[in-house]
Amino acid sequence: MDVIEAMKTTGTCRYFRSDPVPDEVLMSAFDAARFGPQGGNRQPVRWVVVRDKDRKRQLAEWYLAPWKTYLGGIADGDVAVGALPKAVADADHFAEHLHEVPAIAVLCAEIDGLHPTDLELDRISVVGGGSIYPTAQNFCLALRAQGVASALTTLLVHAEPQVKELLGIPDGVITAAHIAVGYPEHGFPAKLTRTPAAEIVFGETYGAPLAGG
């Protein structure tokens, strides 16, 4: 599959078939994902693949609580989202059925392998994620190339202490996301809806149009 096509059609899947994803398909995606960029080539990313029904059900229970709180905020108008009502309904379906997905890939990272350079700034630190999330996107793209869908969420990070205990994740290792993996029930989108590049790309100074954009 052409890499640009994969980028434009790797959406967040909310409906999965029950068919298991073979080990060789997962390992092929993990093998490609590891080439994602990371600071100093420290390679901090680690993965835990969860297929056990009881573990998936427990993860789903921990996911559902913050999701329902978030959903309530949307309904009350306290949380602003750009998603259409159908997309919100699809996300709710996903939350209610998370325990049924074939696999949940838990994205972890060794803290010693991160080097955030923004800790002293008066804002939330984000730089450490630069050594984690490119690998996650590579994983989703590599799955897409094999006809496998995915849905990345960070809501379960709320329950990191419980998740670490459930999965035996050691001290010094954090959870950064959880990725639902499976074959899509309704296929892949022909093209994702995103803000046009001309509206988000600037030249020289913020807000100034890029010449030729």
Image: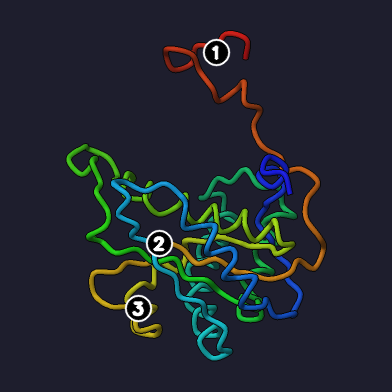
Labels 3 and 2: the sequence-earlier one: 3
Q: Residue at x 67, y 76 (%)?
A: 21
The label number, if any, that marks residue 210 in the structure image: 1
Asked if residue 54 lies left or right of residue 93, the reply is: left
Q: Residue at x 24, y 40 (%)?
A: 118
Vertical placement of residue 26 versus 133, above or below: below
* Mark 3: amino acid: Lys
* Mark 1: amino acid: Leu
Q: Residue at x 52, y 50 (%)?
A: 79
Q: Residue 52 location in percent, x, y?
A: 55, 88
* Mark 2: amino acid: Ala
Do the residues under discs 3 and 1 have CB atoms within 8 angstroms? no
- CA distance for labels 3 and 2: 12 Å
- CA distance for labels 3 and 1: 45 Å
Asked if residue 160 lies left or right of residue 191, the reply is: left
Quarter-of-image position of residue 167: bottom left
* Circle 2 residue: 176
Vertical placement of residue 211 versus 85, above or below: above
SS of the residue at dot 3? helix
